[in-house]
Structure formats: C-alpha cells, structure tokens
Image (cartoon, grey):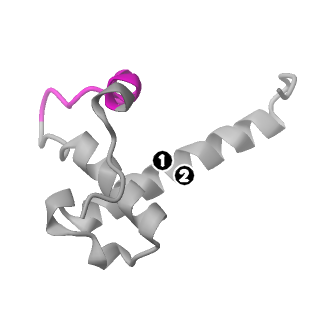
Amino acid sequence: MNIMELNDDQWSFIRPHLPPQPKVGRKRANDRQTINAILYVLITGCRWRDIPKSYGSYVTAIRYCLEKVETMVSRRRMDKYSDRDPK
C-alpha cells in the first residue's frame, strides 16, 4: 500500500538539507526510508509500531521525528529570547 512517499523531485529538494553520514561510527539508517515512515504515520494516523516493515524500524522513525521536533522547538525558543527581530 503506497499511501504517499517522497518522489525523486521532492527527495532531491530535501536531501541537501540533511546532515552528511558520519565519517566514523555507525551509519544512519536510510534517510529517505525513515522520512517516508514518518509521512506514513502522519497521513494514516496509525501507531508507530504499525509502520510496514518496508519502511524500516519504527524506533528509528520515532527517534528521527522526535529529534527534529526538539531541534525546531529549541530554535524557536532561541529566536524568542534572542535580541534579533522576530520574523
């Protein structure tokens, strides 16, 4: 069941904004697959555990999603309390 996955044009837009794979240590999971897993949950409303196996580990998707949300919240806090003009 292909609910909605990133097409090649969308992926080519997103990919440059992601950090590179680490040079040492464990490589990250497939970024495109992980983002597609997050989209699946957001579109279908299913539980994280119900992500199809084709999207990889649901734990990886949860961690990636939470990491990005925490980053966005931190940036907003920094913008709110900084001396810069809010936009």
x and y, in percent, of residue 27 in the image: 14, 40
Q: Are marks 1 and 2 in contact (CB under 8 Å)?
A: yes
Q: Residues within 10 Å of mark 2 (few under 14, many from 20)?
A: few
Res. 63 visible in picture: no
Left or right: 30, with 65 as reference point: left
Please give the name of the residue rendered at 80% of the width and 30% of the height, measured from the top-left corner.
Answer: 82
> What residue is pinned by disc 2?
70
**Which quarter of the rendered picture does the C terminus lie within?**
top right
x and y, in percent, of residue 14 in the image: 39, 29
Q: Nearer the viewer, residue 3 or 63?
A: 3
x and y, in percent, of residue 26 in the image: 12, 43
Q: Nearer the viewer, residue 87 or 73?
A: 87
Measure the alpha-carbon separation of dots 1 and 2.
5 Å
Element type where label 2 sits in the image: helix
Q: Identity of the amino acid at label 1? A: Lys
4 w.r.t. 54: above or below: above
- Checking the image for residue 68, the label placed there is 1
Please give the name of the residue rendered at 29% of the width and 78% of the height, measured from the top-left corner.
Answer: 49
The quarter holding residue 12 reads top left
Q: Would residue 13 be counted in the magenta stretch?
A: yes
x and y, in percent, of residue 7 in the image: 31, 36
76 w.r.t. 69: above or below: above
Please give the name of the residue rendered at 31% of the width and 57% of the height, measured from the top-left corner.
Answer: 37
Left or right: 32, with 53 as reference point: right
Please give the name of the residue rendered at 15% of the width and 67% of the height, measured from the top-left corner.
Answer: 53
Left or right: 68, with 30 as reference point: right
Q: Identity of the amino acid at label 2? A: Glu
Q: Would residue 68 be counted in the magenta stretch?
A: no
Q: Which residues are magenta?
A: 11-24
51 w.r.t. 60: above or below: below
Left or right: 30, with 34 as reference point: left
- Checking the image for residue 87, the label placed there is none
